Image (cartoon, rainbow, N blue to C red):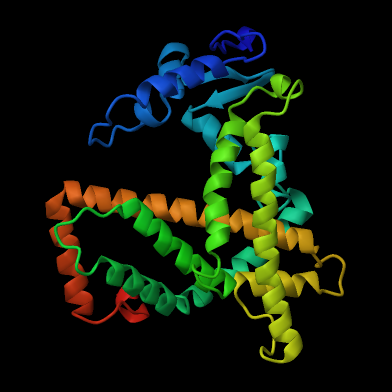
Amino acid sequence: MAAQGIRGPPYGFFHGSTKEMLQMKKEITKRPMNLSHDIFPYVQPHLYKWTKTYGRNFLMWYGAQAFLVISDLEMVKEVLNNRDDTYSKEFVQDQVKKYIGDGLATFRGEKWAKHRKLANFAFHGENLKGMIPAMVDSAHTMLKRWSGREGKEIDVYKELRLYASDVISKTAFGSSYTEGKSIFENVNKLILVMVNASSSFPILRKLWRPAYEIEGEKIEKGFREAVLEIIKKRQEKVNSGELESYGNDFLGLLLRASHEVDEKKKITIDNVVSECKTFYIAGHETATSFLAWTVLLLSIHTDWQEEARKEAFNVFGNRDPDLDGIQS
């Protein structure tokens, strides 16, 4: 790498670059964040500093594992195009993978294509149209909780997390947030465990098991049992005749695939559980962050807020959002 002009922070015995990285993150989070779009130095302070120091492409270390970080646009294009499968998926450490299992996030090749096809069908444009009433219903539930709280502080991030969780439960798994409450509680705990696992030192973990790893296994077990319970309820409804089929939501398509006669199309029940776990983790956290950031920006820029409100009233008036209005 050095011969090709690639530099980077020096390798430290055992920890690689992680000690510096964690120190920078610790220092930056002690400071209040400015209300600015310039969030890169705050969110990824190590990448910001090392890009400035070593250039747009540099080498860093997670323990003994070297990582080439690139931000040169042409090189990024080459990696993302990846027509010849030259670049493998992002490195997923074993201690993280064991919590989310094998699924779309970790598969490659034919397995990835099979699972991606299921996800594409579940969230095809036509299927998304049918999810709008559930999204509106969940929004009404959230706003009802807010009624009578004028002038009082509301933790918007927490509220939007409940909203996103309820929407995912209804649209992808045919349940509700109340029904899947234990799942979402476990999701939030599991995310913290995976953050700890991804930033720990692999060599040191071989000498003793850290507390977060023991706790993570307990959380994963509870998560798995809760997901299996939702799967069991859907199976029982089909077996009793209450439902004619497994349905066309994400869970229904996964269960249908698990009963496929064609081995090439069939997936295991462990795959079903893993995909549910992946979707719960990836789905509600990303949606929550996106919505909360949007609300923050609208609260900072009141002129944008006024324009957005005006547009919504012009399109929908006092009625609930619907497909025709959203598409107009």
Q: Is residue 38 left or right of residue 169?
A: left
Q: Residue at x 12, y 53 (%)?
A: 303
> How many numbered marks, from 0 up?
0
Residue 9 visible: yes
Which residue is located at x 34 percent, y 79 percent?
322
Residue closest to the eye, 51 or 95: 95
Q: Quadrant of the C terminus?
A: bottom left
Query: Which quadrant would residue 162 be assigned to in this image?
Result: bottom left
Task: Identify whether 186 is placed above or below 171.
Answer: above
Relative to 158, does residue 268 appear above or below in the rendering? below
Looking at the picture, how far across and down is residue 158, in whole percent? 37, 53
The answer, for residue 83, to whether it is visible in the render is no
Residue 178: x and y in percent read 49, 69
Q: Position of residue 48 (x, y in %)?
A: 41, 22
> Where does the image place residue 184, in percent across and percent down from the top left?
53, 57
In the displayed structure, 146 sits above or below 32; it is below
Pick the front one: 127 or 30: 30
On the image, which quarter does residue 67 sit in? top right
Q: Quick check: 277 above or below 38? A: below
Q: Residue at x 19, y 80 (%)?
A: 318
Which residue is located at x 70 percent, y 36 percent? 95
Q: Looking at the picture, tell me which residue is in the foreground, 34 or 317.
A: 34
Quadrant position of the N terminus in the picture: top right
On the image, which quarter does residue 148 sit in?
bottom left
